[in-house]
């Protein structure tokens, strides 16, 4: 193989590696919000859970859902609904970056957050701070404006609990938060989920 062919082959291999990395990034990112999507979150969360287990740190998952999102879409249209998703995603992203948390648009109007090394009490306080930050956010487009709230369910795991279990518990707590009137935080434990 001559030098020109070898250099060309080397350049193609580098471009292929860059393309693969970009495809991997795109496949794990939500196009609308720029947050991780469910696939990206699940991969990153598994790594974070493993690291937390090895370090014997608690891990907490928050499932967040925009309250009455269907009504927002029905009343103001899907374009405004997209603006709501983007605005809430930005509040979550900013909060997660400051607190060193993993955040994703998990699907539709639902978001997931994972935090490690935080006590139960601190996790609830973070969730409450996040809920209040979202409630303070006003979304506007033209003459249309709306304040948006979120409901949050959270669940803590230690040891060998797998991601699917803790996500399911957080989702159950989210359902309870919505059932109790929305715009609130509910922690998954025997007392809160039983209601």
Image: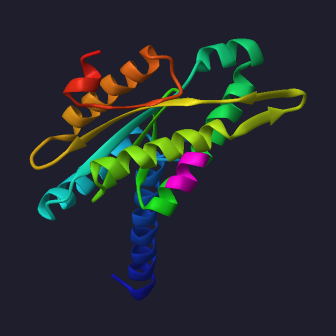
Q: Residue at x 23, y 25 (%)?
A: 191
Could you tell me residue 187's position as x and y percent? 32, 33
Quadrant for the N terminus, please.
bottom left
Q: Nearer the viewer, residue 123 or 114?
A: 123
Q: Is residue 166 above or below residue 114?
A: above
Is residue 171 highlighted in magenta? no
Q: Residue at x 39, y 65 (%)?
A: 17
Q: Quadrant of residue 165?
A: top left
Q: Is residue 119 above or below residue 124?
A: below
Q: Residue at x 22, y 40 (%)?
A: 163
Could you tell me residue 133's position as x and y percent? 60, 44
Q: Answer with left or right where residue 169 lies relative to residue 127.
A: left
Q: Is residue 160 visible?
A: yes
Q: Quadrant of residue 162?
A: top left
Q: Answer with left or right where residue 129 lies relative to residue 84.
A: left
Quadrant for the C terminus, please.
top left
Could you tell me residue 44's position as x and y percent? 32, 52
Please report the bounds of the magenta region as a residue range.
91-95
């Amino acid at each position: 193989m001559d030098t020109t062919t070898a250099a060309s082959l080397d350049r193609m291999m580098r471009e292929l590696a860059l393309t693969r990395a970009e495809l991997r990034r795109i496949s794990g990112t939500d196009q609308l919000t720029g947050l991780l999507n469910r696939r990206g979150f699940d991969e990153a969360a598994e790594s974070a859970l493993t690291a937390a287990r090895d370090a014997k740190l608690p891990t907490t998952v928050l499932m967040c859902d925009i309250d009455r999102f269907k009504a927002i879409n029905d009343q103001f249209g899907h374009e405004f609904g997209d603006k709501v998703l983007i605005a809430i995603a930005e509040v979550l992203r900013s909060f997660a970056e400051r607190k060193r948390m993993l955040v994703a648009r998990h699907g539709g109007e639902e978001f997931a957050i994972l935090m490690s090394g935080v006590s139960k009490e601190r996790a609830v306080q973070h969730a409450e701070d996040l809920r209040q930050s979202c409630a303070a956010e006003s979304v506007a487009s033209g003459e249309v404006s709306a304040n948006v709230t979120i409901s949050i369910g959270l669940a803590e795991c230690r040891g060998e609990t797998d991601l699917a279990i803790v996500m399911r518990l957080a989702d159950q707590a989210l359902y309870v938060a919505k059932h109790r009137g929305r715009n609130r935080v509910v922690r998954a434990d025997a007392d809160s989920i039983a209601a």
